[in-house]
Structures are given as structure tokens and as C-alpha cells.
Amino acid sequence: MNIHYDESRCGSGKTLNALQDMAARPGRYIYAVDRRDQIADRIAALGGFARAANTTPIIMRIASEDGGKFCENVARRIEALPDYYANQEHVIAIITHEGMKSADHSGFAGWEIIIDEDPGFLELVSWNVPAGKVLLESYYELEPAANGVSAIKSKRNTVTAGDIQADDLCKGLLKLHRRVQSGSAYCTLTSWDDLSDSKTPKFAWWSMWDPRKLASYDRASILANNFSKKLSFEVIARKFATEVKLVQLPGPPLQPYVTRDVRIEYFSSTHAASRTVWQNNGDGRNVLNLIEKYVDGNAKDDHLWCANLYKDAFDSRGDKVTPKVAGTNIFRSITDCTVIYSAKASSCEVKMLKAIFGRAVGRQHILTDRETEDLIQIVMRTSLREPDDDRPVTLRVYDHFQAQALENYLVGAGYGFNVTLAHVDVGADAIKVRSVGRPKSDGPRTTSTDRMRKKRAKDKAAAPAKTKPKTRAKAA
């Protein structure tokens, strides 16, 4: 099977072109979006394009109610579409990524699926479970898979996702239970007793959604900026390469952008953004206060900002957004944006990637997939999306590495912006960040055998010299 993907730059019109095509070209479509709050706008846009094309498609929403939670009924409604609309020539059903992952797609021959934004085929999760072992082993069992990996399976006569959702005590298991039900949950435990081996047990598990579940569709497409740098791409390319072929689409013609000045300010040139530094380091907390004062004194009133910090650690005026804002267009007039944000890979996540991919995929992939992509999506909600807006734009991030990543994207994507980086000294460079792990050596790498031989020689040199016992002279 083929999965087509369009990874054109932000603001290129990927979504707009897809909506226009679905509205104008009769067919049966599943259109999957990232968030429920996007559905109403997409329905309105489809209606306008349909009127312009003089078509009358059936357009519907299949998702839980806004403010509600996903339920099993959503998956069943999605699965019922092929039978219910078998005699209709033009149908567009808008669902969420979560709905897509929960449904059975085996009956969708004759349909086309368009997935807007990265669907997150790989999810990495870690939980602290000092009291959770009993709950986990009550509901789930571990089935050996391969290479030390276990599939997480439901025990017979266990609860449903609806039961868990309604239970205040167990609702934290809901995501895991959905993935277990879809057959896509894995871990590196061989027994639940493994959780008892640590004073602070951590349950690390992942879900890898199988893209082959889309094989029944006549055509499957993904629209996502930089998709070839995402973990979802790695899943398809490395785990399903023999059965799934990735086909890149040319994308919409690039619209020329007027030249404008983009100034990217950053506060640290010596260390990377880290919630550990901000939360556990007194100097880090003080620097956040100084950054906040700087932003308050320099940002415009019409200001977009985002911070994933502990409560009350950073505040600003203007419009605050969450990191996941892909597809939002309501901030296109803003020319001032601050993002104090970190989404690095945890040690648990790195270990899970090693179990999944070996050494082929690691920490840097998570940084690119998560932190860098989120930064790009946030700043590209501003007037940078507008091809004809020549007003200068100011962006602020925490560290030089983030500033360089944004510069590389804006220049590499061919927008034609004049990008400059500027270090703002608020004292961040004076923070002493504790290095993690064994310090690197400038000398040749030694093996454990070399170290043991050296230790033995040192011990031998330090031992007191042995004296020979005195012998009596023989009698004449």
C-alpha cells in the first residue's frame, strides 16, 4: 500500500487545497484533524467551497461533544459509515486523530482518508506507579513479543474503556486501555513483578499505531510540515517498509512572500532550555523572573506567548496559547511572540526508542519531532503566515539552540525573510547547570578490562612489601 504525504512549509495552503478538493470532487472522504476545536471551522470552510463549486456533499462531524471525552460509541459510528452511506456519491466525515486510531478501518474500500497534521503513530508514555502495580496486573497481562519487548493485553472479562472513563480512581488508565484494545501497546517488562525492583517504580510503555490499518482506503494522505523528520515517518519507514511505501506529494505551488525583518532574541547561550533548570535551580527561577520583566518591558500589547512551566513561573500580557496550536489562524495579525518552552526526551523515552529502533532513532529525533516542531508551529501562527505582511516580527525563545533551529527553518523553507539572532543578557549564562553522567575524557577510551588491569597494578603497588621468613642455620 502507499501512504502519500505533503510536508510543505507552514502557510503553504496544504489544508486549504485539501478542503477545496474534497468539496469540489465527489467522493467519500474521511478527514482526520488533530483537535475537536478545529472541526467547526473546517465544516464552515467546506460549506463555502461546496457552494462555490456548486456541489452538495453530506458533511458531518463524528467526535465527542466539546468539553466531553472520547467514548467507544465514536469508534462504532466511524465504522458504520461505509454501510450507512454506501449509496451516496459525495460524503465528507470529519473525525479526530484519536477517533481514527480507535476505529476499525477494514470496511472503507472506495473511500479516501486525509490526515491533517502529524497523527502521532508513536506515543511514548512513562508513569510513576509506586502503588499502581496491583491495578495494572489486575487488568492487563504481558505477552512476550520479540527482542525483550512485551505486548500489553487485556485480561478476559475485564472492564471496558467506558467503565474506566466513568471511574474517578481508574480514569488515568484510559489512554493505555484504548491502546491495549487496539492492539498497539508495548513495554519492556517481562513481568509486573519487575515494577517491584525499584524504590520509585516507573512504568514506561509505548503505542505504535499500525499504518497498514489504512490499507482498505483507495488513497491515504498525510498533510504535515516537516513530516519526514517526525517519529511517525520513522515508524513507517523503519517498521513497515516492506508493506507500506511513502510517496511524497509535490504540494501546492509556493506563494511568494514579501521581504520582512525577523529578529529572534534568546537569553541563554551556554545551556539549553530545561524544566529541571527552571524548577530545581534557584538561579533558574530567578532568571525566569528577569525574562518575564524583560518581555513585559519590550513586548507589544498584541503579543502571543507560550510557556510550559510550573504554575505562576512565567506570565505575560497578550494571548497565551498551548504548545499544540497547529492549524490555528486567529493570530495572523500579531508580530510579537515569546516562547519559553522545553520538551526534551526523558531517559525513559530514550530507552524505549532503543527498544523499538535500536540505535537508529534517538534523543535528537524526539527533540526535532517535539520541541523544535512545536516552536515552529507556535511562531508560525503569527503574521509570518501572511505573504503580503511586511511588518517586522520579533520572536523570543530561551536558548541559542532554539533560536538557531527557528532560523534554519525560516531560511531553509524559502520564505525570503531577513533573519537575525540577538542575545539578550539577563543573567541566564551565569546559571551553573549540573552535567549528567560521567564526564567525557580527552584521552583514549578504555575498556572494563583495561580499568581492571590498572586497578590491580595500583593495588599491588600500594600493598606492603612481603618479607622472607628467617631460616635457622643448620647444625654442624
Image (cartoon, rainbow, N blue to C red):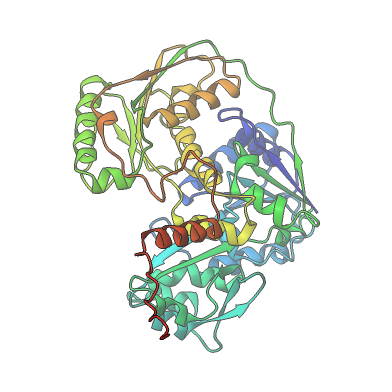
Picture coordinates of residue 292, whole percent (x, y): 22, 31
Q: Residue furthest bottom?
A: 157
Please name whichever residue, 218 or 464, is drawn nearer the observer in this view of the structure. Answer: 464
The answer to whether any part of residue 196 appears in the image is yes
Picture coordinates of residue 382, whole percent (x, y): 43, 26
Image quarter where the C terminus lies is: bottom left
Determine whether 191 is above or below 330 in the image: below
Please name whichever residue, 465 or 456, is drawn nearer the observer in this view of the structure. Answer: 465
Picture coordinates of residue 428, whole percent (x, y): 27, 30
Q: Residue at horizontal 63%, vertical 19%?
A: 255
Q: Residue furthest front?
A: 476
The image shows a total of numbered marks equal to 0
Picture coordinates of residue 367, whole percent (x, y): 50, 43
Q: Residue at horizontal 61%, vertical 36%?
A: 226
- Residue 34 shown left or right of residue 263 in the figure: right
Please name whichever residue, 198 or 294, is drawn nearer the observer in this view of the structure. Answer: 198
Determine whether 289 is above or below 351 in the image: above
The answer to whether any part of residue 124 appears in the image is no
- Residue 278 shown left or right of residue 205 in the figure: left
The quadrant holding residue 66 is bottom left
